């Protein structure tokens, strides 16, 4: 289990704020985002084939973002999103110029093992991850086969990944057969450059 605030892992740091948003606030943001974000189903390149991602996505940022062969074009965030953006910056103690939103419609939506280690994110990316809606399991495993960590990410929680974490650890949001309502996750990032 994580302690509130700073947690030092081998080769990385996690900051955990389980009550970052009050339940009513989290609910209001989830509704707003569900209705007003231009959600898109996108294909990514997986083992040489194009497959639909098992989730809906959206991107706001001053620069394009590219991962898994997919390019999400630069697009300014709507004004109504800025208070949430600033609150996350304040809690993380960082400025962010990009936001990837993921919407998991049910238990068959998820995200496979990966690291957020695109070169544009710089050497030790700080990524602030805000969860809304259904609590889902979030897994971390060290790349050398050592430690594993399983966290439940409830609505209104903020998890900040920092230090060397993205270089040494992978993370995933596994699918589940359990009945599962919608979940929205926002990952705020800082991009130092456009993709090459
Ligand atoms: O949905 C989550 O909690 C994880 C999202 C994630 O890892 C990502 O967008 O890179
Ligand atoms: Fe990630």
Image: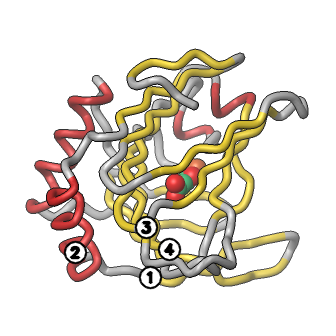
Q: Alpha-carbon neighbours of circle 4 within 10 Å: few (<14), some, or many (≥20)?
A: many
Q: Pointer 3: residues within 10 angstroms few (<14), some, or many (20+)?
A: some
Q: Is residue 53 above or below residue 28?
A: below
* Count of marks, rendered view: 4
Residue bearing the label numbered 2: 31
Q: Name the residue carrying label 4.
A: 104
Tag 2 near tag 3, CB within 8 Å: no
Q: Verify CB contact (< 8 Å) between mark 1 and mark 3.
A: no
User: In the figure, is residue 120 to the left or right of 17?
Assistant: right
Residue at the disc numbered 3: 134
* Observer able to see residue 103: yes
Residue 98 % position (x, y): 36, 49
Q: Nearer the viewer, residue 148 or 52?
A: 148
* Foreground tag (4 vs 3): 3
Using the numbered discs, state the Cα–Cα distance from disc 2 to disc 4 in whole angstroms: 14 Å
Residue 192 can be seen in this image: no
Q: Position of 183 compared to 123: left or right?
A: left
In this view, the mark in front (1 or 3): 3
Q: Position of residue 172 (x, y in %)?
A: 67, 54
SS for callout 4: strand
Q: Residue at x 53, y 80 (%)?
A: 106
Q: Residue at x 43, y 67 (%)?
A: 134
The answer to which of marks 1 and 3 sits earlier in the sequence is 1
Name the disc covering residue 126, or none. Answer: none
Q: Which residue is identified by label 1?
A: 40
Is the distance from the Cβ of mark 4 to the nearest ligand 1 atom less than 8 Å?
yes
At numbered mark 1, what does the secondary structure look like: helix, strand or loop?
strand
């Amino acid at each position: 289990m994580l302690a509130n605030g700073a947690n030092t892992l081998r080769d990385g740091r996690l900051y955990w704020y389980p009550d970052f948003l009050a339940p009513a606030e989290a609910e209001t943001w989830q509704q707003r985002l569900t209705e007003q974000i231009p959600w898109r189903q996108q294909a990514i390149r997986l083992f040489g084939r194009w497959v639909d991602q098992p989730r809906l996505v959206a991107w706001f940022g001053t620069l394009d973002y590219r991962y898994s062969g997919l390019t999400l074009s630069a697009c300014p965030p709507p004004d109504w999103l800025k208070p949430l953006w600033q609150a996350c910056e304040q809690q993380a103690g960082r400025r962010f110029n990009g936001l990837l939103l993921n919407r998991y419609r049910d238990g068959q939506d998820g995200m496979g093992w990966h690291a957020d280690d695109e070169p544009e994110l710089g050497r030790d990316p700080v990524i602030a991850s805000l969860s809304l809606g259904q609590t889902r399991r979030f897994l971390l495993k060290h790349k050398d086969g050592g430690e594993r960590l399983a966290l439940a990410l409830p609505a209104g929680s903020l998890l900040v990944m920092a230090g060397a974490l993205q270089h040494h650890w992978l993370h995933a949001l596994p699918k589940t057969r359990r009945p599962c309502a919608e979940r929205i996750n926002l990952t705020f990032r800082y991009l130092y450059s456009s993709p090459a």
